[in-house]
Image (cartoon, rainbow, N blue to C red):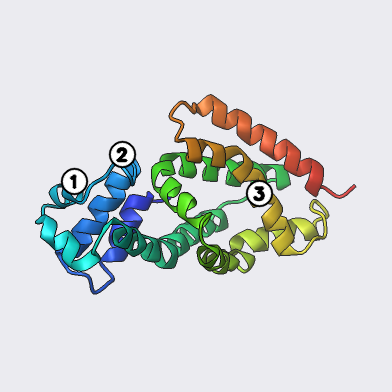
Amino acid sequence: MTKNIQNIFAASLQQTNLSPKQQAVLQASLDLFSTQGFNATSTKDIAQAAGVAEGTVYQQFKNKNGILQAILDPFIQSVLPQVVQDFTTEVGTRQFDDLEDFLTYIIKNRMLFALENKAQIRIFAQEIFRSDELVNQVKNQLGTLKTGSLAHQLQEFQRQGQLVQWPLPRLLQFVFSTFMSFILPVIITNRDDVSETQVEQWTTEAVTFLLHGLTPQ
């Protein structure tokens, strides 16, 4: 399973020019926003969790909205590309018996990842719905899927006649939107009661739906 978002975020901050204290503030903020919510988190909470004076928080980031924006930038520019790269690398190291085996793997894999990181993803999901700019940035980052191992595997299934001859962007959109229809309500409502059995059932239902739509008639 891919490294969790909190760890990828921390690693991405180490590649910036931010001071250790500033990095600590952003890491603490992501953790607190994830666990107790943006509105319920005060700058005092953040300072205490980061081990810095509250004035340090205001000096660099002005307010909580400034902190949130400072989190979103590395999330889009570093965390999301790393998540995509890790996933496509995983896909590239596996052998799949057929289209059903492939879809089952990627849907279940991403469901488990989303559930493991739902608190962090929820922060991002809430903001992306408010900003066309964020939507466009995400589209640009996800565009790499059209040239990676995921795309190559889809093209191979097309060559074998197992998959409809649709353009890759359309295929990826179809798969992604089906996956999101199951997982997005869980993220938005912050459900904690999703069992492994439920994930298995959702995976089966999603794959059945996708096979019906993607298999040549």
Tell which of 37 and 172 is nearer to you. 37
The answer to whether mark 2 and mark 1 are in CB contact below 8 A is: yes
Crowding at dot 2, Cα within 10 Å, few <14 / some 14-19 / many 20+, comes out as: few
Q: What's the distance in space between the residues labelled 2 and 1, CA to CA?
A: 11 Å
Tell which of 35 and 203 is nearer to you. 35
Residue picked out by circle 3: 177
Is 54 placed left or right of 9 in the picture? Answer: left
**Mark 1: amino acid:** Asp
Residue picked out by circle 1: 45
State whether residue 98 appears in this view: no
Percent from the top left, x then y, of residue 164? 82, 55
Q: Residue at x 46, y 26 (%)?
A: 193
State whether residue 43 appears in this view: yes
Mark nearer the N terminus (3 vs 1): 1
Crowding at dot 1, Cα within 10 Å, few <14 / some 14-19 / many 20+, comes out as: some
Tell which of 68 and 161 is nearer to you. 68
Q: Is residue 80 above or below residue 198?
A: below
**Mark 3: amino acid:** Ser
Percent from the top left, x then y, of residue 89? 51, 59
Q: Residue at x 56, y 58 (%)?
A: 92
Residue picked out by circle 2: 36
Label 1 secondary element: helix
Label 2 secondary element: helix
Q: What's the distance in space between the residues labelled 3 and 1, CA to CA?
A: 37 Å
Is 181 placed left or right of 63 in the picture? Answer: right
Tell which of 59 and 137 is nearer to you. 59
Percent from the top left, x then y, of residue 26? 26, 58
Percent from the top left, x then y, of residue 23? 22, 62
**Dot label at residue 186:** none
Is 92 placed left or right of 174 in the picture? Answer: left
